[in-house]
Image (cartoon, helix red, strand yellow):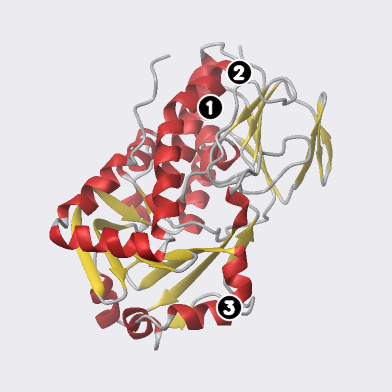
Amino acid sequence: MVSEVLILGGGLAGASAALELARADVPVRLLERETGPHHKVCGEFLSIEAQHDLRRLGLDPVRLGAVPVDRVRLVSGGTRIEAALPFQALGLSRKCLDEALLEAAQSEGAQVERGVKVIALEEGKIATSTGSRTAERVFLATGKHEIRGARRDAGSGADYIGFKMHWRLAPRRMSEVGSAIELAPFDGGYAGLQCVAHDVLNLCLLVRRERFARLGGHWEDLLAELMRAPHLERLLGDAEAVFSRPLTIANLPYGYVCDPVSPLPPGVFRLGDQAAITAPLTGDGMAIATRSARLAVACLRAGSGPAEYHGKLQELVRSQVTRAMLLQRAVELPLAIRCVAGLLGLWPGVLGRLAGMTRLAQVPPM
């Protein structure tokens, strides 16, 4: 009998793991820092792999209000290229999805404690805002937040700042977006747009810190720069901002993949963004979260420890992350994106194939 598993974080990875463990009658307790449903900085793109993992757990994203995404569109200057995705993706708010997973986990017997902030991992205990906790097996799923005692190697990916804003659009504007995910590169970054409800558009973007500073260092400055693109000005010019301010995050180690022998307290498994952070433009972040949860549960139930799990996870995601980071760096270079746009203009179908090349591999057999 596996002793109680302590999950730190109630996002996509943590909640998925809690649900699967509870259904397998493994005692599980989950600590979530927020007191209720909340939005997160995320592109909210559910790839076919993430959908498969969610449906394994008995969760149907379409029943939660997810909308179809079956095309990819690249808009750069006056160039607009569109192609079919090699799969049907979905757009769905993380606020809705994460809460549905937590509720499902609770209904299966998982103990969920809200309003508990994890502060540090120390030898033999976990420091939280409500006191110290102990557990033989810990799933570290705190997402983008760094935890003392379990910091990730920042590398060169920490030069970016991420923003997210939801907009409520008129029906005629939503029809312009349609069922496409739209990528709009600009000097020093890129924006991604897609529908996440019948009348809500998610704008998620990444910009290099120095570029943001040159623009003025404020959201309004960055938004004004984006609005110089005619199609974005047309879409967002009369849109209603759903949030009073955008959600933002910085200092993330994009390109990070956990090391199987990284120094962590015994019994700690990294999940989701704590395990790997891929380039957002490929839309694989949510799939990495669900796959890491699935793999961690499988390893735990098979009697495997963190080192074996981290090795299998590294094998699963390393190639995807490497390809995704190369693609991200390419779209930030004005000359490179002009060349790519020219080639894609001649062969639009290549755009869909590029999307297919960044998919995750299958979960290795246990």
In the picture, the disc for residue 215 is: 3
Q: Residue at x 65, y 44 (%)?
A: 154
- Secondary structure state at the residue bearing disc 1: helix
Q: Residue at x 58, y 60 (%)?
A: 38
Mark 1 highlights which residue?
21
Q: Is residue 271 left or right of residue 268?
A: left
* Mark 2 nearby-residue class (10 Å; few <14, some 14–19, many ≥20): some
- Reading the chain from its start, which is encountered first: label 2 or label 1? 1
Q: Nearer the viewer, residue 68 or 157?
A: 157
Amino acid under disc 1: Leu
Mark closer to the chain start, 1 or 3: 1
Q: Nearer the viewer, mark 3 or mark 2?
A: 3
Let me know if residue 85 appears in the view: no
Q: Position of residue 206 (x, y in %)?
A: 51, 62
Q: Which residue is mark 2?
A: 307
Q: Quadrant of the N terminus?
A: top right
CA gap between label 1 and label 3 equals 47 Å
